[in-house]
């Protein structure tokens, strides 16, 4: 079978190659992979910022956002042939730490976890995959290929769970929400926010392309004129860009008891002079700034539930560049109007349609 592999840190090493077919163990599903999503983390691995292969290996099968269809399932498992599945990315550390021991591997304390397609474990951009059933999440057949968004949506589900948990420390509601960045994570964060029925603003640099329309379709307000133009007193800011200047600026646009959730990864090594008012205002009005990464099983399940109840036309426009396997390399080239780029291995079997986005065809790069 074919898989996209790389020597982390060497972008010239990226290739589609023949690798050994998986041999599922007693507790494992055999999946026929349908789609793999590409995100900033994949580009960081290509650029050498993060990532390493499994022990004793030079190359890593890339990809951690994926959708597969069950070919074979262990007897007595919750899965049957034909089920659509999103594979979970992170695996608990072997110690395990107190969090990994109870399935909260997203909160691992010792850093010895592995992540498929990222650190120490082969990923999902392959034609077939053997996957322990405990790391498989069922995707509604109604969602079809859009189940490729379950992984990024799980990150957002966790972020919102933690925001609401922190908010519950007092009498507080997320009445005004700001999302910075309208990439896939920002758009999915906006989707989750609008489901709360609250006022949602989104800030991004794009002045045209699909982002303003995707934000507007959710009933949120789109801004591209800079943070200073969109007001203050936000109850929540979800920072999804990782832009360091923005990270430092957003606490000032929250109201008393405001919560800033950092979901974008900032480059290393920035040094700035910080005005002490930042710390003073965090204290005097109970503001919180916190970071979040990854998700555990319940976040994937929540993501799959929310996506199954979301307008599929809208989701189809988020997955706006679908590259067939034969043209796989094209998927790793960035285009200005990209939202979510995916490699399509196969259309799902069993009558699940791969819906084209508006004005797009599933097999044609736009
Ligand atoms: Zn752990």
Image: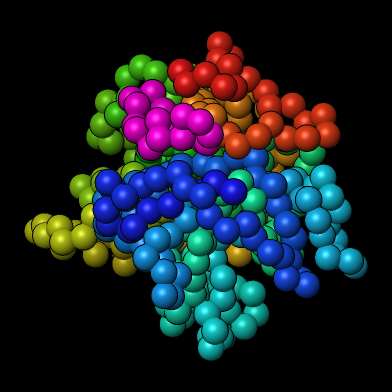
The image position of residue 201, as x and y in percent, is 44, 33
Q: Quadrant of residue 297?
A: bottom right
In screen coordinates, is 144 left or right of 357?
right
The image position of residue 312, as x and y in percent, is 68, 27
The image position of residue 242, as x and y in percent, is 31, 49
The image position of residue 243, as x and y in percent, is 26, 46
Along the line of sight, the residue nearer the viewer: 148 or 17: 17
Give the residue at x 43% y 52%: 5
Check the image and report above or below for 317 versus 190.
above
Residue at the extreme bottom of the image, as rendered: 95
**Would residue 253 be seen by someone viewing this image from the given angle?**
yes
Residue at the extreme right of the image, as rendered: 76
Give the residue at x 30% y 29%: 205
Give the residue at x 82% y 60%: 73
Answer whether residue 138 is magenta in the image. Answer: no
Along the line of sight, the residue nearer the viewer: 9 or 289: 9
Q: Quadrant of residue 57?
A: bottom left
**Would residue 199 be seen by someone viewing this image from the given angle?**
no
Along the line of sight, the residue nearer the viewer: 172 or 158: 158
In screen coordinates, is 119 left or right of 47?
right
Q: Quadrant of residue 99?
A: bottom right
Answer whether residue 337 is magenta in the image. Answer: yes
Check the image and report above or below for 71 versus 221.
below
Tell me the magenta residue range: 325-343
Give the residue at x 43% y 75%: 55
Check the image and report above or below for 365 versus 59.
above
């Amino acid at each position: 079978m074919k898989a996209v592999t790389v020597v982390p840190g060497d972008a010239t090493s990226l290739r589609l190659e023949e690798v050994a077919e998986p041999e599922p163990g007693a507790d494992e599903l055999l999946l026929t992979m349908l789609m793999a999503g590409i995100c900033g983390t994949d580009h960081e691995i290509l650029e050498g910022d993060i990532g390493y292969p499994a022990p004793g290996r030079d190359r890593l099968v890339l990809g951690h956002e994926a959708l597969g269809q069950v070919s074979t399932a262990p007897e007595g498992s919750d899965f049957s042939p034909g089920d659509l599945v999103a594979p979970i990315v992170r695996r608990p550390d072997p110690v395990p730490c107190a969090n990994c021991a109870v399935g909260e591997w997203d909160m691992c304390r010792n850093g010895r976890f592995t992540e498929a397609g990222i650190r120490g474990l082969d990923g999902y951009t392959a034609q077939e995959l053997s996957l322990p059933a405990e790391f498989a999440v069922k995707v509604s057949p109604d969602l079809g290929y859009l189940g490729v968004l379950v992984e990024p949506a799980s990150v957002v589900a966790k972020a919102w769970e933690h925001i609401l948990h922190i908010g519950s420390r007092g009498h507080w509601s997320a009445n005004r929400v700001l999302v910075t960045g309208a990439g896939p994570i920002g758009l999915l964060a906006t989707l989750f926010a609008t489901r709360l029925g609250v006022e949602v603003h989104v800030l991004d640099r794009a002045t045209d392309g699909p982002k303003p329309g995707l934000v507007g379709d959710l009933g949120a307000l789109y801004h591209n004129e800079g943070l200073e133009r969109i007001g203050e007193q936000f109850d929540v800011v979800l920072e999804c860009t990782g832009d360091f200047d923005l990270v430092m600026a957003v606490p000032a646009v929250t109201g008393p008891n405001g919560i800033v959730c950092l979901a974008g990864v900032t480059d290393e090594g920035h040094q700035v002079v910080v005005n002490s008012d930042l710390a003073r205002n965090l204290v005097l009005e109970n503001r919180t700034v916190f970071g979040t990464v990854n998700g555990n099983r319940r976040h994937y399940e929540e993501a799959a539930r929310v996506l199954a109840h979301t307008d599929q036309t809208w989701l189809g426009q988020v997955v706006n560049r679908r590259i067939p396997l034969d043209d796989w390399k094209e998927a790793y080239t960035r285009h200005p109007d990209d939202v979510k780029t995916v490699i399509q291995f196969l259309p799902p079997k069993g009558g699940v349609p791969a819906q084209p986005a508006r004005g797009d065809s599933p097999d044609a790069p736009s």
